Image: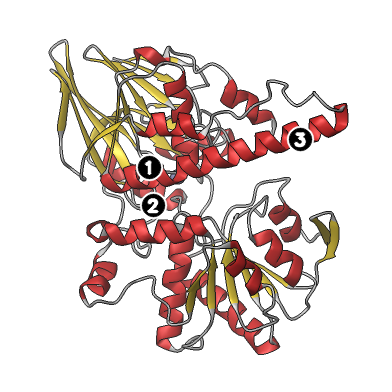
Amino acid sequence: MRLSFHGADRGVTGSCHLVEAAGKRLLIDCGLFQGSHELEEDNAGAFGFDAASIDYVLQTHAHLDHCGRLPLLVKRGFRGEIISTPPTQALVRLVLRDAAAIAEEEALRRQRRRARRDGEGAGHDGNGPLYTRDDAERALARFGRTLHYRQALQLAPGLQVSFHDAGHILGSASVLLEIGEGGRERRVLYSGDIGNRGRPILRDPAPPPADIVVMESTYGDRNHRSVADSVTEFNAAIDATLRRGGNVVIPSFALERTQEILFFLREATTSGRLPRDLPVFLDSPMAISTVQIYRQFPQYFDAAAQSLMANHSDPFDIPGLRLSRETGDSIAINRIEGGAVIIAGSGMCTGGRVRHHLRYNLARANASVIFVGFAAQGTPARRIIDGAPSITLFGEEVPVRAHIHTINGFSAHADQRELLHWHGLAGGRERTILVHGELKAMTALAGLLQPAPVSMPAPGEVMEL
Ligand code: ZN
C-alpha cells in the first residue's frame, strides 16, 4: 500500500491524505487551509494527485479544515462517492453551503473594491471565489452511503472500511481500513481529529487497535485546564457581569462549541448557579441550524445527554433562550444595555454578527467578552485577548473597557495526556505517523511515543508500506 500526504502535514489545517491499496484510491478528508491570506493560494493550488482518479472520499467530520476543498475536488474531476457517518453528512451540508456563500460574498466585495479603485469596467479580474454555491451543491451530490460507528463496508476485495467514535464533534470519526494485500492483512487507522474524554454531549473516543496509525497531534506538547475548572471560571465571569449590570458577549464557533456552551448554560441555569430566567440570545442562523441537526441524532449523544432526551428534557434548552435568525431580531439585541448573554459568530470576530455586539458592548466597563475557543494571530479576537486598548469595527475605533475573559479548557482537541491515552488503545505497533500539528507539538509527542517507529511526513511525501 502507498500512503501520501496532501494537507495538514507539519501544520494543522487542510487535512487531506491519500491511500492507494487493493486497486483503489481513497482520500481521507479534503479540507481547507485556514488562517491567513497567504493560505488562499494553497487552497487554489494543485492537490498533488489527479482528482478524477479518486474512487472514494472517507470524511472524518464536518469541520471546514477537513471538508472545505471537496467542492474543488469535484470541480477538478472527482466523480466517486463520499462516505461518512449520518451526522457528518448532515453537518457538511450546512458547513459547505455556508462556506460557499461567504466565498461568493467576499469575491463580490473584492471586485467592487477593485472597481472603485480602478474605475468603471474593471469589475472582472479573475479573482473570483474559490468555489461557488453551485460547486458546493455538486460536491454534496457526491455524498452516498453513510455508516454508523463500527459498521463495516467492503469497498473492494481486500479493502474494508469502518468508522469509530472520535469524540471531537457530533458524528466525528476515526477511519479504519482493513487491507489484505500480498497475503498480508493489515489495519490502518486514521484518527481524524481526536476529542477529550468526558466532554458533554459526546461519547468518548473509541479507537480500534491497528498496525499503522496516522494520528493528529495538535496539542502534542501541552495539557488543557480541566473542563470542570473551566465551567466554574465561565459561570463566575457571567455572574460577575450580571452583578455589574452588563451584557456578556460570547464570540463562538457555530459548530460544537456553541452547543457545548448552551449545555453548560442549561446546567448553570437549572442548578441555580445562574439565574433561571437568564436571557440568552443565540444570534447565529448557522448555530441554530446546527442545534437542529444535533437534535436529529440523539443516538450519537453520550449517556447523560441521551437520558435528558429520554426524559423530554432537551440538552440545549435554556428557559430564557431566544433564537435570532433574522437580521431584525439581531439588531433588536443592540438595544439591550445589560443583563443578557449574547452568543454570536464568528468565533475569532473576523466577521458575522458578533462584530455588532462588540461595537455596542466593548466600550462598556460593566460588560464582558468571554472567549471560549482558539483565536489565531492577526484576528480581532487575538488583539482583544492580547490587551489592545481599542479595535476598529465598521471603520470606527472602539475602546476596550469591557472585562475580557479567555477560557482555555473547552478545546475540542485532545491534549497530550489524551493523545497518549488514545494511542495506547490504537497501538500502531508497526508505525505511527503524526499529522495535523505544528512541528514543535509533533516532536514533543513523538518523543513520548518512541522507541516505536514514528514518522512526521512533509507535505507531498509518499510512503510505501
Ligand atoms: Zn475538527
Q: Which residue is mark 1?
A: 61
As drawn, 7 above or below 148: above
- Look at label 2 and name its amino acid: Ile
Rendering quarter of residue 153: top left
Q: Are marks 2 and 1 in contact (CB under 8 Å)?
A: yes
Along the line of sight, the residue nearer the viewer: 426 or 349: 349
The earlier-in-sequence mark between 3 and 1 is 1
Residue at 59% from the left image edge and 42% from the top image edge: 102
Asked whether mark 1 lies closer than 8 Å to ligand 1, one says yes
Asked whether residue 447 appears in the rendered view, the answer is: no
Along the line of sight, the residue nearer the viewer: 279 or 232: 279
- Residue 203 spot, x, y in % from top left: 29, 57
State the SS at label 1: loop
- Look at label 1 and name its amino acid: His
Q: Are marks 3 and 1 in contact (CB under 8 Å)?
A: no
Rendering quarter of residue 327: bottom right
Q: Which residue is mark 2?
A: 169
Asked whether mark 2 lies closer than 8 Å to ligand 1, one says yes
Residue at 28% from the left image edge and 60% from the top image edge: 301
As drawn, 175 above or below 229: above
The earlier-in-sequence mark between 2 and 1 is 1
Q: Which residue is mark 3?
A: 112
- Look at label 3 and name its amino acid: Arg
